[in-house]
Image (cartoon, rainbow, N blue to C red):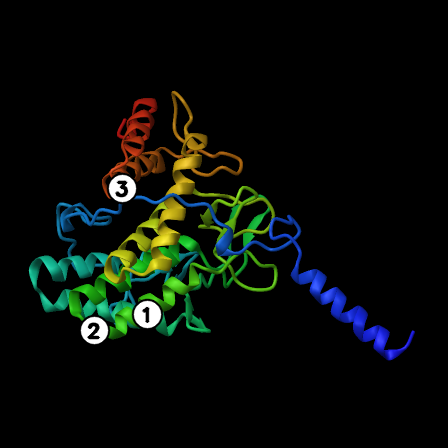
Amino acid sequence: MNLKTLIFLGIAVLVSACGVNSDDPELPKTLSDINYNEYTINDLPYEEKPYIYEYVRSMTMENFDQDSIPVFVYEGESYYHPVYTSLFGIRFVDGYIRTGDEDYRILAERIAYKLVENSKAANDKFLFPYNFSYLYSSGNLMVKPWYSGMAQGRLLTFFTRLYSATGDPQYLEWADNTFESLKLLKDPFQEWVVYIDEDNYFWIEEYPAEGEPIHVLNGFIYATFGLYDYYLATNDPEAQKLLNASITTIEHYIEDYRNPGWVSFYALKDKPTNPFYHGVHVDQLNLLSKITGEPYFKEMADLFESDYQASE
């Protein structure tokens, strides 16, 4: 076989590969494949938004470092836990907004800088690590450092609200970088936090484990709230698409989490139950109903609540 023939065959293979049907199940999925409905997204009054409670949180902390950054103690060691530490940040931003007390702002900004300092930054993306290994369940060991879609979504809320409260463009840039992480699709060769299933529904995974996806409900919805905050602040069309896609997935699968007459399922894999998170599900579904104006989410919240009264 001469050189010209080899070149021709090589070009033919490339042309053939480029022309493969995008529905081929062997090809990796992309964000262009995802299912999404168009929802009305309501900008709720501040006091009705996620993470806003009747009371302003005090600045006291049980565990903190030398710079008054809250830390999470696990197996005797202290860590900057992305979900735990950033929730203090969100609540301190709320304290600053509602009281005007500069000490709240100072603490919130310290938390933001510490979390960014400890992040993995690459290609305009921030990933916030769990620096301890965690056994979610048999066969699902999250090996340090690992990353969580729920954490990424909560940090997105934190930076977005810190920007809105202070007007400092640094925090918007950090929100942008965090939003970019919510495009990291499942990949055996790099960190990832989102997943597209065989029916092209978009999932944000609290525990991005290998093998069968876990699909934790509360973590997915909290991450969706991050997309909600970011979209309201930026009107970014990509954020709108991912927000709509997340809500579409929740609407499509929510009945699979219902456990009629009892506690709703915490996750779809193995379907564990937890009374505390059942109450969280009810609250989250009520919020999704307000955000979208869709009565279906309110109906499901009422059904979940009728199955089991979490306060009992």
Q: Amino acid at mark 2?
A: Asp
The answer to the question of whether label 2 and label 1 lie on touching residues, with beta carbons closer than 8 A, is no
Label at residue 8: none
Q: Quadrant of residue 159?
A: bottom left
The answer to the question of whether label 2 and label 3 lie on touching residues, with beta carbons closer than 8 A, is no
Residue beneath the point at 77% across and 70% down: 10
> Number of marks in the image?
3
Which x, y percent locates residue 288?
29, 41
In front of the other: 236 or 189: 236
Q: Amino acid at mark 1?
A: Trp
Q: Quadrant of residue 168?
A: bottom left
* Residue hosting label 1: 174
- Looking at the image, is mark 2 or mark 1 earlier in the sequence? 2
Q: Amino acid at mark 3?
A: Thr
Compared with 213, 11 (above or below) is: below
Residue lying farthest to the right in this orientation: 1
Compute the Cα span from label 3 to label 1: 27 Å
- Looking at the image, is mark 2 or mark 3 earlier in the sequence? 2
Q: Quick check: can you spot residue 79?
A: no
| Residue 116 left/right relative to 168 | right
Compute the Cα span from label 2 to label 3: 29 Å
Which x, y percent locates residue 7?
80, 75
Which x, y percent locates residue 259?
42, 26
Q: Quadrant of the C terminus?
A: top left
Compute the Cα span from label 2 to label 1: 11 Å
Q: Secondary structure at mark 1?
A: helix
- Which of label 2 and label 3 is nearer to you? 3
* Residue hosting label 3: 292
- Looking at the image, is mark 3 or mark 1 earlier in the sequence? 1
Label at residue 168: 2
- Which of label 3 and label 1 is nearer to you? 3
Compared with 239, 53 (above or below) is: above
